[in-house]
Amino acid sequence: MSQTLEGTDEFHPSPSELNGEPSEGIFGRSPLFQKCDRFTKADELRHVGLYPYFRTIESPQDTEVIINGHKMLMLGSNSYMGLTNDPRIKDAAIKAVEKYGSGCAGSRFLNGTLDIHIELEEQIADYLDKEAALVFTTGFQTNLGVISALVGREDNVFIDRTDHASIVDGARLGFGKTFKFMHNDVDDLDRLLSNSSAKGKMIVVDGIYSMEGDIVRLPEIVKVAQKHRAAIFVDDAHSLGVLGRIGNGTADHFNLTDEVDVIGGTFSKSLASIGGYVAADRAIIEYLKHHARALIFSASMAPACVAATQKALEIIIAEPERREMLWKNTSYMLKELKRLGLDTGDSETPIIPVVIGEMEKCFAFWRALHDAGIFVNPVVAPATPANRCLIRLSVMATHTEEQLSRALSIIEQVARRLGVIGAEA
């Protein structure tokens, strides 16, 4: 490869270039892409039939889906309320397209704000008992925009080590310094806050952690935050619809809505759409409207998505029996998986990890379930420790007991065959 002297533009050809051999960096493919050429892991997994990603679904996201023409039981969806194929929501989306068209052709900041955006923001603020709300195009953009706008050069942000990638990236985009505390370890958080001399401090946590399935220790975090005058931002991506008196999230679940400064999340899970939101006092929302770059420089949430979210929110509030069924299904699955001797970690929610161990065994477990008609998601390093790879199950309100019982029977057979649990006597 060609070399340049540090701090100069002087070019020094390599021996191969002097001999007339092609140089990637000058006459051919850029060295930038060498990492792409070296990346072969995905093809290696495809070759042995163990590639579990980007599976193509040919049907609505429901308790059963069609993949390659075959029906599969879906135990890997985040549609906790089971609303993604609800005819009322689909009808609302269709009517929105008929009235407003397919898109907004601009950002909320300029030409992309519709009356239904404002309506949805008012509904979200009321639902979460906050003064105001702001909707983004995706949940990921919500965290990018909110955290990077609020955390300035003189500030520190404190995030749980297992927080979602969007929280990590939002912290990176901010000009403040980021500190990670051990998962759900309030003592470690207290230690980091005590050592910080920053002007402003913000703690960012998930309400329900997306891989572990456990709930944030919010009451203890509130006490520590108040001790250090730190703000709290809770991401309710997996909590909305699931926790709270009317599905309105983690803060309400603990009766701590007034103590949580900022609540954010996504519409892509329980609310059967796509988009994101942040709710807080009016001054915070007004600031974000004029400083969150992920909002200002992105096209706004499409009309069909807004209308679908509104209808899903209406259904969740009007039909509490959905949440009751979700928790009934969750309790059943957790109890039965533990009875089989499987390790479900600290899960207490519809997100249920089944710890398998080494990566090879985890992929083999996934493949066996896939071949038996069960759709699940394998989670391996670096998303989890190398010796603690897991299968992530997620339960929906619309799963029937027969479906869950059938899945448990297949999981047991595979677990015994692969030695994850002992063979029957």
Image (cartoon, rainbow, N blue to C red):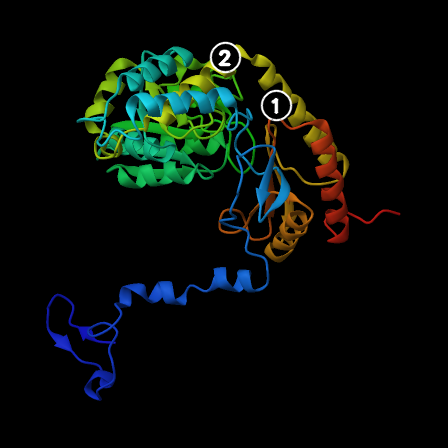
Q: Is residue 113 visible?
A: yes
* Camera sees residue 231: no
Would you name the residue on which mark 1 appears? 326
> Do the numbered discs 2 and 1 sit on residues whose CB atoms are within 8 Å?
no
Q: Where residue 13 sits: x, y (%)? A: 18, 80
Please state the horizontal and vertical placement of residue 43, each as a whole percent of the image: 49, 63
Task: Please give left or right for residue 317 compared with residue 303 in the image.
Answer: right
Tell me: 72 left or right of 89.
right
Q: Which of marks 2 and 1 is nearer the N terminus?
A: 2
| 172 or 25: nearer the viewer | 25
Q: Quadrant of the N terminus?
A: bottom left
According to the picture, the residue beneath numbered tag 2 turns out to be 317
Q: What element carries label 2?
A: helix
Residue neighbourhood size for the residue with mark 1, other residues' Cα within 10 Å, grouped as few (<14), some (14–19), many (≥20): many
Q: Position of residue 11 (x, y in %)?
A: 13, 75
Q: Give percent across and percent down for residue 295.
A: 25, 30
Seen at 42% across and 20% down, the residue is 92
Direction front: furthest residue? 98
Residues at marks 2 and 1, CA–CA distance in whole angstroms: 14 Å
> Which kind of residue does numbered mark 2 sit on?
Ile
Between 231 and 369, which is closer to the camera in this rendering? Answer: 369
The three-letter code of the residue at mark 1 reads: Leu
Choose top left, top right, bottom left or bottom right for residue 402.
top right
Circle 1 sits in a helix, a strand or a loop, which is it? helix
Tell which residue pokes out farthest to the bottom in this image. 19
Quadrant of the image occupied by residue 29 = bottom left
Q: In this view, does 181 lie to the left or right of 332?
A: left
